[in-house]
Image: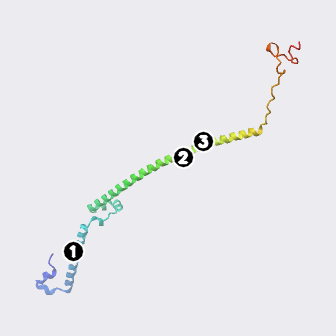
Amino acid sequence: MPPSIASRLAGSPMRSQLSGGDVRAERMVKQIRGEVEDLRGTLAALSAAPGDLETLDIDAVVASPSAAALLPPATLVAAITALHDRNRRLSRKNAKLEARLEALDAKVRDLKQDRAWARGRLDTLAEVIEALHANIEDLRHHRDNTRAVTPPPAPRALRAAGQAGVNGHPAEHPALPGSAAEG
């Protein structure tokens, strides 16, 4: 530390010529030097402090890359490492979500296929019921619109039972045309 004005003048014959302004200036210089030393100590403490106290605004770095070049390398490395870790976590989360999405898509496809199969079965059942209903209506219509048919009378014999003709052939009936009785 350089010698102060007061100490230099103490050994000089001009000591008596120091004015009050000189003394006040000397005090101010001492005070400023003390404050500068305090600031140096604070800066040294901040530079030795862990990097957790510093955060880097990535958006600001992207907006002004030239200003980012002036940042301490340790700060940039910490920010890159943090971004890498975050990116890795998000990639794992994304992979899990994609796997879940694929599983849900497969489930949706299966449900659509089951629904289509059930719909086809229901449509087939509806068609069968319609056909059975139409058959029942046809049977009702037939029942209601047809008259009861009387059975035909029993066959009549032209001769009396037990009369046989010549040589076991039936005898010709005298009233029928072409019979032997006409001739």
Give, as a three-letter code, the residue at label 3.
Answer: Thr
Q: Earlier in the sequence, mark 2 or mark 1?
A: 1
Kind of element beneath mark 3:
helix
Q: Position of residue 105 (x, y in %)?
A: 47, 49
Q: Nearer the viewer, residue 153 or 129?
A: 153
User: Label 2 vs label 1: CA separation?
Assistant: 82 Å
User: Label 1 vs label 3: CA separation?
Assistant: 96 Å
Give, as a three-letter code, the residue at label 1.
Answer: Glu
Q: Residue at x 68, y 42 (%)?
A: 133
Residue lying at the far bottom of the rendered structure: 16
Q: Residue at x 39, y 52 (%)?
A: 95
Q: Position of residue 112 (x, y in %)?
A: 52, 47
Q: Quadrant of the N terminus?
A: bottom left
Q: Nearer the viewer, residue 153 or 53?
A: 153
The image quadrant that residue 178 belongs to is top right
Q: Residue at x 19, y 84 (%)?
A: 23
Front: mark 1 or 3: 3
Q: Residue at x 51, y 47 (%)?
A: 111
Contact, mark 1 vs mark 3 (Cβ under 8 Å): no
Mark 2: give few (<14), some (14-19) or many (20+) Cα within 10 Å: few
What residue is shown with label 3? 124
Residue 37: assigned label:
1
Q: Position of residue 101 (x, y in %)?
A: 44, 51
Q: Position of residue 131 (x, y in %)?
A: 66, 40
Give, as a three-letter code, the residue at label 2.
Answer: Arg
Kind of element beneath mark 1:
helix
What residue is shown with label 2? 115
Mark 1: give few (<14), some (14-19) or many (20+) Cα within 10 Å: few
102 above or below 36?
A: above
**In the shown orientation, is residue 144 left or right of residue 130?**
right
User: Label 2 vs label 3: CA separation?
Assistant: 14 Å
